[in-house]
Image (cartoon, grey):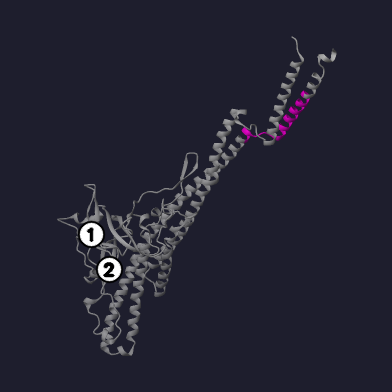
């Protein structure tokens, strides 16, 4: 085969260029420390790199953003629940103290002072927020659990569902003592028929007081037979039906001696109570009946619960823009791993009962009544020592007044003991709810920590796989580059010698 000078020259140029390309590729790899700089150089490495980078990007989102956000949310919730449990522990202790029958006025005053301070804080923990998002209010993270200030013009229509288990005993007192201020007012004392009297009834208490008047049609019960909500006034009791009254004021009822017919149910808008006659209470309890009361309320005090977090309701403040709320399960979930979500929120309605505030108010009212009753006794005993009441007639009359005041004090002490004894059970249940919520939250936090550890390991593994697929060791590149550069130089030298002599040099 005849080899011409042009063939040698052409092949030399090809070889030189090939070596030069290798040098350029290795120079680029040494500069970037990457195996390829464009997909066409190695499609397999490119496809694998895209897949690994996509997975790593997801891991970074979970490990560096979602999981820390979820941890922060859970930590804020745990702190609030811990404080809530402390508050309930304190109220529980006050209930235990108030349930004794050896209290002094100083003891009662101390209980009242503690309850008043705890009442201010009881729901404030429910307003806890994480980065401006309230953690106990479900999807409505932009709203506090309670009203932040008095709102006199805010109106809601609320439907509150009540269980037969919420029926409880309540004591009412008539003919309470009004202290006389002069011998003329002392008069002839207190007649036997005007002595303080105790009236015991069953009642259902709503979550709010000072509501608007309502119609009898707004009191419903669930009829298991028909499977529908029926008017309470249509419930059959014996040979009759329930006599529902909604137009009687609390003051009028008190003036009538707190009388309730056996088949009656009386709603008082002032106190938010449905007082039940004996037959009605027994019927509801024996049939395990559920009730639903729909009422309007205008004006809310600072610290009162916002109805939309607990009940089906409608914000009717603006008649042209009414907002309807439906009570539902509103779990906020964070994606913390591939196809794995975690519920981070705890809903207030599951842990902070709407009755806690009113229970504390009732405890405070009861101890206030006991303090006032004993103050009346002390005042009358002091009056007996005054000169203006030294005559036998005044002394005899004051004895009657004192007898009435002592009877009122005995009633007040007995009522306080019973209310506080019942409060021991109630607040133990409230504490149990918080403990259960903390336990559930702790289990979710443990799941989060386990996932976080797994995400950390996966992130390290994918970083290593990505590096193996894309990166090159600098020492290996230097060795290959040196070899390629030497080959390039050698090709230049060989070409210069091979192409240095041609046939013309011999002619």
Q: Quadrant of residue 256?
A: bottom left
Q: Secondary structure at mark 2?
A: strand
From the viewer's perspective, is residue 264 above or below residue 329? below
Q: Which mark is residue 172?
A: 2
Q: Position of residue 39 (x, y in %)?
A: 60, 30
Name the residue furthest top: 1
Percent x, y of residue 189: 25, 82
Circle 1 crowding by C-alpha within 10 Å: few under 14, some 14–19, many from 20: few
Q: Earlier in the sequence, mark 1 or mark 2?
A: 2
- Camera-side residue: 134 or 507? 507
The stretch of residues the image draws in magenta is 467-491
Relative placement, left or right, of 261 versus 463 is: left
Asked whether residue 428 is in view, the answer is yes
Above or below, comparing residue 471 to residue 210 in the picture = above
Residue 56 tag number: none
Residue drawn at x 36%, y 70% is 367
For residue 56: magenta? no
The residue under label 1 is 215
- Residue 40, compared with residue 128, is above or below; it is above
- Asked if disc 1 and disc 2 are in contact, CB closer than 8 Å, the reply is no
Residue 71 x, y percent position in the rendering: 51, 49
In-front residue for pair 504/57: 504
* Occupied quadrant, residue 142: bottom left
Residue 472 belongs to magenta span? yes
Mark 2 surroundings within 10 Å by alpha-carbon count, few (fewer than 14), some (14 through 19), many (20 or more)? some
Quadrant including the C terminus: top right
Name the quadrant of the N terminus: top right
Is 80 located above or below residue 70 in the figure?
Answer: below
């Amino acid at each position: 085969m005849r080899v011409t000078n042009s063939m040698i020259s052409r092949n030399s140029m090809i070889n030189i260029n090939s070596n030069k390309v290798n040098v350029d590729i290795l120079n680029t790899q040494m500069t970037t420390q990457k195996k390829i700089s464009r997909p066409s150089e190695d499609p397999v490495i490119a496809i694998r790199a895209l897949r690994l980078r996509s997975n790593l990007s997801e891991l970074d989102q979970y490990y560096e953003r979602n999981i820390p956000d979820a941890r922060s949310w859970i930590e804020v919730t745990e702190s609030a629940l811990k404080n809530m449990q402390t508050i309930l522990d304190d109220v529980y202790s006050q209930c235990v103290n108030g349930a004794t029958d050896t209290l002094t006025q100083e003891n009662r005053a101390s209980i009242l002072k503690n309850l008043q301070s705890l009442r201010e804080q009881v729901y404030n923990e429910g307003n806890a927020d994480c980065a401006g998002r309230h953690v106990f209010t479900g999807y409505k993270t932009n709203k506090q659990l309670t009203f932040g200030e008095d709102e006199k013009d805010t109106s809601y229509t609320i439907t509150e569902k009540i269980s037969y288990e919420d029926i409880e005993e309540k004591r009412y007192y008539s003919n309470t003592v009004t202290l006389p201020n002069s011998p003329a007012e002392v008069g002839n004392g207190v007649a036997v028929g005007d002595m303080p009297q105790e009236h015991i009834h069953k009642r259902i208490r709503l979550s709010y007081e000072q509501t608007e008047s309502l119609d009898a049609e707004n009191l419903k019960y669930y009829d298991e037979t028909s499977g529908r909500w029926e008017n309470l006034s249509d419930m059959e009791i014996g040979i009759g039906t329930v006599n529902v009254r909604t137009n009687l004021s609390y003051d009028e009822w008190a003036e009538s001696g707190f009388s309730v017919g056996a088949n009656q149910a009386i709603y008082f808008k002032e106190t938010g109570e449905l007082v039940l006659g004996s037959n009605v209470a027994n019927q509801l309890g024996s049939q395990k009946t559920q009730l639903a009361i729909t009422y309007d309320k205008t004006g809310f005090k600072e610290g009162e619960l916002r109805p939309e977090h607990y009940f089906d309701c409608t914000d009717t403040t603006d008649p042209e823009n009414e907002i309807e709320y439906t009570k539902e399960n509103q779990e906020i979930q964070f994606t913390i791993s591939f196809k794995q979500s975690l519920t981070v929120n705890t809903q207030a309605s599951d842990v902070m009962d709407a009755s806690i505030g009113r229970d504390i108010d009732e405890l405070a009212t009861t101890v206030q009544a006991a303090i006032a009753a004993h103050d009346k006794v002390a005042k009358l005993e002091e009056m007996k020592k005054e000169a203006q009441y030294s005559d036998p007639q005044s002394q005899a009359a004051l004895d009657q007044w004192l007898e009435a005041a002592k009877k009122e004090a005995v009633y007040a002490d007995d009522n306080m003991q019973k209310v506080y004894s019942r409060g021991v059970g109630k607040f133990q249940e409230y504490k149990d709810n918080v403990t259960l919520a903390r336990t559930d939250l702790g289990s979710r936090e443990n799941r989060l920590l386990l996932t976080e550890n797994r995400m950390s390991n996966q992130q390290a593994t994918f970083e290593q796989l990505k590096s193996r697929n894309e990166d090159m060791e600098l020492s290996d590149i230097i060795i290959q580059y040196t070899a390629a550069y030497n080959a390039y130089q050698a090709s230049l030298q060989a070409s210069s010698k091979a192409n240095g002599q041609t046939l013309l040099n011999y002619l």
